Image (spheres, rainbow, N blue to C red):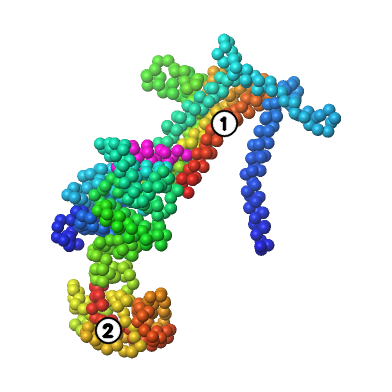
Amino acid sequence: MSGRRPFMLRGRFWVGMLPWAWLLLFFLLPFALIVNVSLSTADLAIPPYVSPLHATEDGHGVELVPDLSSFRRLADELGSIGEDGADLLYLQAYGNSLLLATLTTLCCLLIGYPFAYHIARSRESVRNVLLMMVMLPFWTSFLLRVYAWMGLLDSSEVGLINQLLLGLGIIDTPLPLLYNTGAVLTGMIYSYLPFMVLPLYANLVKLDQRLLEAASDLGARPITTFLSVTLPLSRNGIIAGAMMVFIPAVGEFVIPDLLGGGDVQMIGRNIWDDFGPNQDWPMAAAVAVVMVLLLIAPIVVFNRSSRREAEEQP
Amino acid sequence: MEAQQPGGEAPYLRIESVNKRFGDNHVVRDVSLGIARKEIFALLGSSGCGKSTLLRMLAGLETPSTGRIVLDGEDLATVQPHRRPTNMMFQSYALFPHLTVEDNVAFGLRQERPKLARDAIAARVGRMLDLVQMQRYARRKPHELSGGQQQRVALARSLAKEPKLLLLDEPLAALDKKIRQETQLELVHLIERVGVTCIIVTHDQEEAMTMADRIGVMSDGVLLQVGTPDEIYEHPNCRFTAEFIGETNMFNGRLESRGVVCPDFPTPIAIGPAAGVSQGSEVSVSVRPERVLLSREQPENGEGGFINRAAGEVTDIAYLGSYSIYHVRLASGRNVTASVPSARWGDAAPPTWGDPVWVSWKAPAGVVLSR
């Protein structure tokens, strides 16, 4: 073996290690810290918890004494379902979050699919312009765009949509557009649409045109071709887009907070409240850990599906 | 070109003055062609010559700018693409990657209206897979098949609806050379067994000559010549065909009463009867390498009439087993290629590099082409 090769191999090894190092440093390590906090006992101190890791009595080792009260609280809620006056604060928040994320994902898919399909079928020059327009909103601050929606949806006479409808004489009194679930959903769909369009586009643009021609040649009408060729072959684009929307949407905090007012309880808000005003870090951490566990299932589905595609289209 | 059949009966498929323009690009120029029932016809040409566009117009994937396509008495322009009685086997097959072999073959049958019964479809799919000997692979997905197996599935899929016209777009281009040669005849036998009229688009002249009853040579959107493989090879009607099909020696000169006056030869080149070329015009004489004789001695005029001859020197030899390709440089500096059977020399040693030799050919071997 020449002298250069081990050097080259070493370089490749370190480049290969980079993503692992990144994941270790910025995902696994923080997650371990969160798990640690979730097993702690709340305390009036700085930081406001007592770690479950104690020094052993002989002073030479470390022992784990987990405080499971936060998880028990969640389990108790689960057990109290159906009882009168049951306090289902967290479960309702989880439910709301999952429901809103699901609705957001479905709406993004329904709007985003024709969007992505059209871009993928456009001439290359037009395509780039359209893609640019999909990404254009990213050039302004996310927060600013949510505030813009507050201005649009405002429930008084000054709200832009209300102004327009009042001005046209369609309504007499302003509609209550802001601070409800509809406003949150609108804001979420708007914000997450690009995350649906881009993976779908990347998938649809690869679709072999000859497959569509072959379907037509074999007598399939356009709608049949779409349902039996285009749609199944874009499955992985759909799954990728759905994951890109669903996963962050579940934990979304800013949009429900700004557009939902106090009415819409979502899990991101509960975490914020417990870390902030309530000073209950172990509870907040436990809620966060459960959320990650809930999201692992769809991620596993996604991975298995993309592995299947890799096999089918070598 | 006349849309007439050798047999005289009305052609099954008539392509009448078809033109296709994409913007300023005139891709297919005034093509007229008649094809008989059960004929296997090859459209031969290099890439971009318009042959694929012509095929796509037959499939209904493109519409002619002008002209008519009539199949079995029915003008195809009036038939919606998904109802055409034609089926195409696409280049690199375009099998549906998410469907199994049997679902691929059944795809077209499931589109039939009125709907076919489930077991009727299954039975037809079974027969098709039997035909191409792919029954064992019915449940596989296309990516689990070899290139040759994919080709057979694609063929079964395009035959399943029993089309009146089968269109094959570069049917074997995606295969390795060895499999390709085996598959050519296999495919022809299969098409003949089914008895379907078939048009093959190919850039491979060997493929066209092996598979087709007749060949149409296309260049630049124009159908230059239509004929049987040997007509096309032995009697090309233009320089393009002569040079595109096989190898040839092309001598440029002027046609006079004594023959073609060419600066490479001391005396005019004697030729056979030259039709359609007027005296005094600039012409080319095409002589196939296997018609060129090579000898150490000056050849004499024989009973076959005039012999064209010139002395030269061997510059290159490619020994290919049963024959060798000799490159001979004439006194004028002009190169002549001769394909010489290895048995030609008997027990004598064949000429080698630098040897003085004579090249010669009989007058009828030279095909006169206008320039």
Q: Residue A41 in the image: state x and y as whole percent.
A: 72, 22
B128 or A239, which is in the foreground?
Answer: B128
Q: Quadrant of residue B325?
A: bottom left
- The stretch drawn in magenta includes residue A223: yes
Q: Which residues are magenta?
A: A212-236
Seen at 63% across and 48% down, the residue is: A16
Quadrant placement of the C terminus of chain B = bottom left
User: Which of the 4 image quadrants contains residue B105?
Assistant: top left
Asked if the residue at tag 1 contacts the one at tag 2, i.e. Cβ–Cβ closer than 8 Å, the answer is no
Could you tell me which secondary element the residue under label 1 belongs to? helix
- Counting from the top left corner in percent of width and height, residue B323 is at 37, 76
Same chain check for tags 2 and 1: no
At mark 2, the secondary structure is strand
In this figure, which residue is indicated by the disc labeled 1? A295
The three-letter code of the residue at mark 2 reads Asn
Residue B184 in view here: yes
Q: Does A4 sit above or below residue B344?
A: above
Which residue carries the number 2 mark?
A: B308
Residue name at image x 85 percent, y 30 percent: A58
